[in-house]
Amino acid sequence: MEQSTDGVSYCMLGRAERVQGGWRRSGLSLPVGQTFYVRARGRTTGGIFNGSSGLVESSAQFYRLAPPFLLPAGVGSDSSFAFVFTNTTGASFTVLATTNLTAPVPDWEIAGRPVKLSGDVYQFSEPAANTHPQRFYLLRSP
């Protein structure tokens, strides 16, 4: 496995291990907030008595967002629940909500989208939050 920030010059990440359904390389420290590329290369053998060999290569482009930095949540003057967070400018977010924390995430409802306040600062508020005795939120991107 190799990594590149320009798609041309690559540096070694190390060997991947075979896992069910594919390959895995753990313990990586990949770039945040920028485009980067990962390339996997492997040798193949075949033919009579494995007398032939080849090289297989695959690469993919990624962009990894930094985790959001959540600021203290509060209650607005209209009894709405609100929280503010910072993250990469231009990222898109959705807030999911549920009253049952043990519910699987696909069963959570979409509560809305945060609005951009300025730069990389976003705010989410839900006026209907006070209609629930308790409510849990999940911030998802994208």
Image (tube, rainbow, N blue to C red):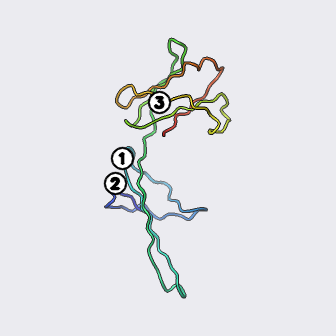
Q: Secondary structure at mark 1?
A: loop
Q: How would you rate the neighbour count of disc 2 (Cα within 10 Å): few for under 14, some for 14-19, many for 20 or more? A: some
Assess whether mark 2 and mark 1 are in contact (beta carbons under 8 angstroms). Answer: yes
Q: What is the C-alpha distance between the residues marked 1 and 2?
A: 8 Å
Mark before the other along the chain sequence, 2 or 3: 2
| Position of residue 61 measured from the top left corner of the image (x, y, whole percent) | 41, 54
Left/right of residue 115 with respect to residue 6 in the rendered view: right
| Residue at the spot of label 2 | 5
Mark before the other along the chain sequence, 1 or 2: 2
The quadrant in which the N terminus is found is: bottom left
Nearer-the-camera pick, 48 or 16: 48
103 above or below 127?
below
Q: Tell me which amino acid carries mark 1.
A: Gln
Residue found at x 52% / y 12%: 78
Nearer mark to the viewer, of 3 and 1: 1
25 above or below 122?
below
| Residue at the spot of label 1 | 34
Mark before the other along the chain sequence, 3 or 1: 1
Residue found at x 47% / y 65%: 15
| Residue at the spot of label 3 | 70
